[in-house]
Amino acid sequence: MNNKLLSMLLAATALSSASAVQAFNNGDVITFKAGVTTISTYGGSQVKSGSYFAMDTNGDGQFTSEERLAISVGSDGGIVIGSIQTASGSHPGPPDGSEIAPIDAPWSFFGNTGMHQTTGIPVVDNGNNTLDFRGWGVTWNGITIPLGGDINLPADTGLATVSCANVPCNTGDDFVVDYTAHVPLGDPSGFGGVGYQLHLESDIPLPPSASISMDVVGGSTQECSATGGSAISINATSAVPDGDAVASVDWMIDDVFAGNGLSINSFFALGSHSVSATVTTVNGLTASSVINVAVNDTLAPVVTAAFLDKDTQMPITAASSRDRVDIEADATDICDSAPVIDAMVGAGVSDADRLRVSRNGNRVSLNIDALDLSVHATDASNNSASAGSSLTIVE
């Protein structure tokens, strides 16, 4: 579909949030009204209305009407969102028809031919009525001049602003795109440091568009709640133009189809996952949104360490040297069904408490006053915990 834009101005504006609704999608065309030139009272020409660019050639920090040059759309019909549009064939002298000019028709500036273009980075919609113009520039007199936010001046952000009645712009809005920048210092064109302004006025209103957003129940980052991951619910909210209706909402998890409808409940394994939802309307409009969902395991295993009565299997803290005693060394973990367990039994921690044994007939007895049990467990996410128990030996 063709989108027709307003005016672009290189103004410093804040980047939009990831949840912002985009007015212009990849493939949309920002077309603009041609600039209208009139003769001033001083005998020179000036742009009276429509779209133009300007250079602050006198260095006064202003862009006067006499410094403006009217422009009109090129062979692509304007700026194509998401596409790199490279112009070629700029040359000395006025335009002669040999130029390739996709964004705007060739123009003559200081007696030489030039055209606007994007190189390296296409124009994209950031949402919240800003456009990414970091790849913006011109080719003039055979010279490529980058105008995508020069590092020499912090005010040159590489963002163009879109002015309309709403944020973001709605269907039917007229709009203006404004962008400002500076020619890089030392540029071979001879215009290094000169201020630049672009102003585009919409030719037609914005076309109908749809939008969709997602809400993760419990948040986009969650603790593991079952072996290997968590079951997570995600709800979608969509908006469509008046007179249209939602035909379908399709879900993808890590590029694999995960269902349809306004909500899904899926099991997410440990780690980070990409989730997308795409709404399609009865009239054929589509819109997509992508979020990341992460499942983390930060909880340590629950460790059990105990001496047990041989007959009752109940924990005990004292036993006769003639009793038989069982040892419980175990661990459970919400996310890991088989944490690694290390257990050790000893007679204390000092050299003086070493185990001593004596033989009485065919039996070997421990000659100690107490036993200590130490149990350590580690799960698959490297969370660990320890527990201990002591058994007093009585006669």
Image (cartoon, rainbow, N blue to C red):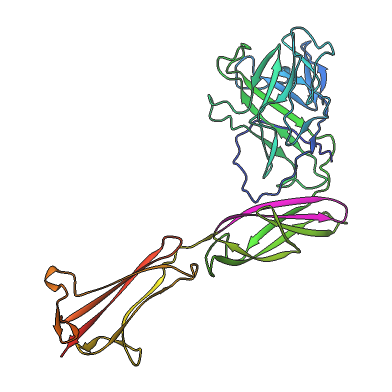
Our reading of the magenta stretch's main secondary structure is strand
Figure check: 129 above or below 8: below
Number of disc labels: 0
Splitting the image into 4 quarters, where does residue 344 fall?
Answer: bottom left
Q: Quadrant of residue 254?
A: bottom right
Identify which residue is drawn at 48% across, 67% down: 336
Which residue ends up furthest to the bottom in the rendered image?
Answer: 311
Left or right: 390 as drawn, with respect to 149 = left
Q: Position of residue 255 (x, y in %)?
A: 68, 52
Instruction: Choose between 20 and 64: the one closer to the eye.
Output: 20
Image quarter where the N terminus lies is: top right
Residue at image position (81%, 59%) is 248
Please state which of residues 236 and 208 is positioned toward the viewer in this rendering.
236
Q: Is residue 188 magenta?
A: no
The picture places residue 18, in percent across and down from the top left corner, at 63, 48
Which residue is at a point 62% across and 45% down the rendered structure image? 16
Question: Viewed as shown, does residue 139 lie left or right of 153?
Answer: right
Instruction: Examine the image and state in which quarter residue 324 appears.
Output: bottom left
Quadrant position of the C terminus in the picture: bottom left
Q: Position of residue 275 (x, y in %)?
A: 66, 55
Q: Report the residue at 60% width, 62% height from top.
A: 268
**Residue 154 left/right relative to 178:** left
Left or right relative to 393: residue 164: right
Residue 201 x %, y %: 78, 32
- What span is colored magenta in the figure? 271-294
Front residue of 297 and 171? 297
Residue farthest toward the left in the current orientation of the protein = 352
| 332 up-or-down from 129: above or below | below
Above or below 212: residue 180: above
